[in-house]
Image (tube, grey):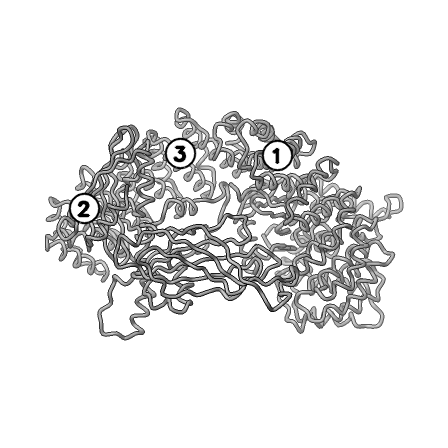
Amino acid sequence: MSSFKRDKKEEEDGGGNPFQNIEKTTVLQEARIFNENIINAKKCTHILTKILYLLNQGEQLGAKEATEVFFAMTKLFQSKDVILRRMVYLGIKELSSIADDVIIVTSSLTKDMTGKEDLYRAAAIRALCSITDVTMLQTIERYMKQAIVDKNPAVSSAALVSSLHMSKIASDVIKRWVNEAQEAVNSDNIMVQYHALGVLYHIRKSDRLAVTKLVAKLTRMSLKSHYAICMLIRIASKLLEEEETSNDSALFSFIESCLRHKSEMVIYEAAHAIVNSRRTTSRELGPAISVLQLFCGSPKPTLRFAAVRTLNQVAINHPAAVTACNLDLENLITDSNRSIATLAITTLLKTGAESSVDRLMKQIATFVSEISDEFKVVVVQAIRALALKFPRKHSVLMNFLSAMLRDEGGLEYKASIADTIITIIEDNADAKETGLAHLCEFIEDCEHTSLAVRILHLLGKEGPRTKQPSRYIRFIYNRVILENPTVRAAAVSAMAQFGALCPDLSENIQVLLARCQMDTDDEVRDRATYYSSILRQQDKSLYNNYILEPLQVSIPSLERCLKDYIQSKSDEAFNIKSVPVVAAPTEEEKQISNQKTEGMLISTGPPRPVVSREENYTEKLSAIPGIQQLGPLFKSSEIVELTESETEYVVCCIKHCFTRHLVLQFDCINTLNDQLLENVRIQLDPSEGYQIVKDIPCQKLPYNEMGTVYIILQFPDDLPNTVGTFGAVMKFVVKDCDPNTGLPDTDEGYDDEYMLEDLEVVLGDQIQRVTKMNWAASWDESANGFVEMEDTYSLSSMNTLEEAVKNIIQFLGLQPAERTDKVPEGKTTHTLLLAGLFRGGHDILVRSKLALADGVTMQLTVRSTDADIAELITSAVG
Amino acid sequence: MDSSLLQPTLYTVKGIVIMDNDGNRILAKYYDRNVFPTSKEQRAFEKNLFNKTHRANAEIIMLDGLTCVYRSNVDLFFYVMGSSHENELILMSVLNCLYDSISQILRKNVEKRSVLESLDIVMLAMDEICDGGIIIDADSSSVVSRVALRTDDIPLGEQTVAQVLQSAKDQLKWSLLK
């Protein structure tokens, strides 16, 4: 009975899967019938299908098994059955990378490829090319050339596509087929035309002039293949992009003319190219936008998706241009394809004016409950951007976000909302109180530990500085009573922050902490005891160092240093100052991490650990002899280019700063393919006081490979001398060589040199940015013990406060604290607070008071543990 | 912005997948070594893709850095993947070609059982549509003509009554399920 039931079920499933229960070993057994004298085509085809199916399901064959099957398969060439033969080709292609000695079938395939049966020829070419290596290519070259210009389109296409595949292993051979490819472009068959264009472009892509000629010729002859036109548009837009002079009108008008093509594919490609070009002006954008607008109303989801995705991209740079489509976009909000709807919403949010925010939020509210979490995250991100754009609308947006926070949702969704609220709070002081209130309410009922911990941390950071800090204590202490140990520990830390910053609450906090010392969890008890004893000391500087400021070192470096310390078995205590401090992320880095395509769903994987730039370089540098003794790397500068980008030799420099030494890393690239450089050195003319300790030349610099020269310098003892300009000349031995092989023609070379631009060592190279959570406390504390210098400057070249702030930060290489890098609108005075660490571990605090009146006047107060450093900073400005 | 400018290359398709209505792979081909290099990653992606697409009949989705266009019929799902900046309409043309070719090969019986019965021909068709990521042909009739069809493609007049009935039944079923 039960078996009958199962049969019936299988019947309903469509007879079950005949391939469901096959096993590798059985099939390999069955494959032996390939060796029989008389071949049963039908049976063999079936077995071959099974093998291919297994491979397709991800089954792995060992080299021996694969070779066995491969050789058995070669026997099947005796059969005349068309399908079987074609399956053999497929099998050859699949196994070519696993089995050994695959070239054995070369002659059989060559015979098929040149034979009469058209059904064999094209497929045989493709199979043949998958087993061919560089050495064998010579023997089939003649046939390939013939095949490219064959009158059968399938054969020609197959040959072209295969040559493109093979250009990865033997690009010079393929380059010789350029004439045949040229002929194939003129073919009547659309696919041949497309493939020939692809091959031609691939051969010539490094030769700009040839590409320009190719495009000029093809734009005139109006290609038939839509794919080929799309390809041509891409080539043309790439040319336009690389062009240094003004817009080449011929190329642009070609792309624009494609907007009037009859195929949607081509129209979209052209619109996409225009929209994504850096040089497109808003006027030129017009026709492309109206085409996309038309697509928004298409019945095909793909077309609507393509249009709205492209409009979304336009909205980033030219929001005004997209406003014409707002009506169409609003219609798309209710689209059944949620990707389209979400993209439409985010586009609208980008283009929307301040006045339309309320209306849009209402529309989103009706729609947001229907979409999945991933799309909600996208919407939340768009709201974040909107909040940053229109700070005055924060109450509407905040209400909306808190409503979303109350809804059901996964961790990722909730985390993105919390993130957004946190960003808004950080950006907009007016929104702080409401935002914190929403978050307090949220942690009352939050099931995600990681999120609760983050919010508690934020409350500890921001709460004490609000008007009424005491109201947050209740929320935080509630967590101590109700939550799991991790959250309890975080709550204890948050409370300690209140105790340290609000003297009138300190006593109450002590009482609460005393209660926490009875906790069942070790970590919670430890923290409570730790904080309570520090708070009892009533010492401001202890508060600062051990409660308010988090650890400044980079965690991976700390781990590495501790490991080294344990291995060295030294008697000395571990010195935390020897660990490199972590650099505060610069604005650019933050932006990069935020960049991602909108509307894209990403399945979550483990996040990559963030490794600082210094950490990366440390590994590279520690391999260089002589650098390890210099101690830990303090800071690496940005890359400085010492040559123009399109010269014979390209050289860039990175300045690595150590406690007492400066290491210059010169990355050199030789762009001449007929030269081999040897013994490449950089002759440096350092400014006064610098001593060259060692230079490490690059022995060999072949064409297009990066070689590195290092120079180790010792900093001058006199601090003011550390800022200076170095002259640099690259010296090397040139050997002429064969461009194809890269081998030198003769053993003898001649000396040559190449002037590089001057290298400047600036103040910022020696300073690491440090984030101070509580700048004011550090400043107060530094009143005694630090050296203070003060000076007044007039920065006549600056016209706005923003500009001045940006330049000061960049020049000094210090990290702005307490968000003073943002100048409130309409103010004529501003105070910029900066913090950093000079090499050798000297703290620097800078307060710069700016006033705007006919240029900017600045009063700069520098405090540092070292008098020379303070003097250096005041003297460097101006 | 710059990265979204399309590189002129023929390597357009990153992958083609056919799944059944339980999300099991029937055939799958990935053409870019950098996209899901291991079988495990491929399976994980397919599972994710299927979960996101089997209910919503929406034709296009962006997932894990790929643009995926898809189409389903009875108990089959067809997917074509390209890079996230790829021209969606080109991918769609490949998908349509794949679907139409298979539909012609199986004489409109686009369902799991028929695909498995003619798996060899379907494999050949996939190979004719895309080779290593390059679109070889996007015209279904030319693809079908290139994958040697079995000779039992007899005109209507020479079929037996049973055969005609069977094909009529199939047609009816197909039109109902559509």
In the image, residue A74 above or below residue B31: below
Residue A468: image location, x then y, percent: 18, 38
Please identify the quadrant where the C terminus of chain A is shown: top left
Mark seen at residue A291: none
Mark seen at residue A386: 3
Which secondary structure lies at badge 3?
Answer: helix
Which secondary structure lies at badge 1?
Answer: loop
Rounded to the nearest angstrom, the CA distance separating label 3 from label 1 is 37 Å
Q: Earlier in the sequence, mark 1 or mark 2?
A: 1
Rounded to the nearest angstrom, the CA distance separating label 2 from label 3 is 42 Å
- Indicate left or right for B66 with A88 as reference: left
- Image depth: mark 2 or mark 3 in front: 2
Q: Which amino acid lies under the numbered mark 1 shown in the image of this protein?
A: Asp
Mark 3–mark 1 contact, CB under 8 Å?
Answer: no
Mark seen at residue A248: 1
Quadrant position of residue A355: top left
- Indicate left or right for A468 with A166 as reference: left
Which secondary structure lies at badge 2?
Answer: strand
Reading the image, the residue beneath label 2 is A789
- Report in which chain the residue with disc 2 lies: A
- The residue nearer to you, when weighing A721 against A236, is A721
- Report in which chain the residue with disc 3 lies: A
In the image, residue A862 above or below residue A45: above
Residue A133: image location, x then y, percent: 70, 64
